[in-house]
Image (tube, rainbow, N blue to C red):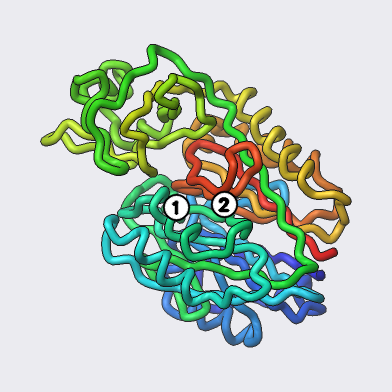
Amino acid sequence: MKMGQALIEASGPSLPEFPALAEIVPDLILVFGAVSYFSTPGFHQSLRERFPGAAIAGCSTAGEIHGSRVLDGSASITAIEFEKTTALVRSTNITAMSDSFEAVARVAAALPIADLTAVLVFGTGLAINGSALVAGLQSNLPTGTKISGGLAGDDGAFCRTWTMGSDGAAHDQIVVVGLYGKHLHFSCGSFGGWAAFGPARKVTRCQENILFELDGECALDIYKRYLGDHAEKLPASGLLFPFEMLSANEEPLGVYRTILGIDETTGSLTLAGEIDPGGYLKLMYAHTDKLIDGAESAAAMAIEDQSPHPDDTLAILVSCIGRKLILGDRVEEEVEAVAHQLPAATTITGFYSNGEISSTSLHGGCRLHNQTMTISLIHER
């Protein structure tokens, strides 16, 4: 397994020369970058011309992870040449949030099943139900298939996000990468580092990922009351105060939910994933040191599931835009904490997202995560 990386920091459809990629005949190209690259006519075509035999996949971001750096306004390109693994990319359009399950089910069904080991998925970051997306994948893939990926970002603007598949870039597209072969080892880790505050409140009215009432009271009113002055900047300030999901017995599930939108008319909150109608929710806040420690824990979790740890490993990091906003100038510290846990020669790529998708043993299968650092480690045995 050979890998090479290149970073573009000037916009435009043409690709510069990349000496680091000259010795690689890639099977898969992963591209994570600012919206401007995906919306630029000709950028995908330049990738296709440069790497004619490769499957291409990626998405727009709220920040690019390239090695141990976190950048904005760039495009990170990672080329992977497998020795014994096959990569196939499939994509489909999503018509509305209500189409989340069916859309990803369509694209998952287009993947051959024989020898499928793992799937990477990149979904639009707006007008999507991330939980339904995960459910659609799981219902159409063989049991035991590892799944990871994330929802595209647009630097926190929440206006238009993009994904890219082998056929091009689009703002209403779900892209999946199927990885095939018994020699592929794929492990995941996911951890948050947020702290809960306030009482656990019963979900008394919700519809999928729309929260209407908590403890019989308007959910938006409660949320604004807790946020205080931050409420004036909703929905953007909602990234700083996610919900922790609790079971019907008020037990923490290790799953968070970010607010993507509000509706003043109905008094509702639109969350990035589905809510348990019989569960409880607690508000959360973050401390920078705990977020960095959480990223380190995610790396340790991924490593624990992958032994031995060869140098020719690819690490795909997907972290939440909410974490980036909290960490501010210290954002690179969480990536550095992950890099410190991995073999020195590990190739690191990834992005800051509107939602993280990961299979972990801690959560008993794949879930949509919010406000977490998720890590996928890939190598060939």
Which residue appears at 74% of the width and 74% of the height?
Answer: 85
Q: Residue at x 60, y 48 (%)?
A: 359
Badge 1 marks a residue whose secondary structure is: loop
Tag shown at residue 351: 2
**Residue 9 visible from this viewpoint:** no
Mark 1 surroundings within 10 Å by alpha-carbon count, few (fewer than 14), some (14 through 19), many (20 or more): many
- Which type of secondary structure does the marked residue at label 2 adopt? strand
| Closest to the observer, 168 or 325 | 168
**Picture coordinates of residue 40, whole percent (x, y):** 43, 72
User: Looking at the picture, which amino acid does disc 2 mark?
Assistant: Phe
| Residue 280 found in image quarter | top left
Q: Residues within 10 Å of mark 2 (few under 14, many from 20)?
A: many
Estimate the spatial distance between the alpha carbons at disc 2 and disc 1, rounded to whole Å: 9 Å
Residue at mark 1: 153
Q: Nearer the viewer, residue 276 or 230?
A: 276
Judged left or right of residue 52, residue 133 is left
Quadrant of residue 217 within the rendered picture: top left
Vertically, is 87 above or below 221? below
Residues at marks 2 and 1 touching, judged by CB atoms closer than 8 Å:
yes
Q: Can residue 68 be seen at all in this image of the molecule? A: yes
Residue 318: x and y, percent? 58, 48
Q: Nearer the viewer, residue 349 or 71?
A: 349
Say which label, 2 or 1, has the lower sequence index: 1
Which corner quadrant holds the C terminus? bottom right
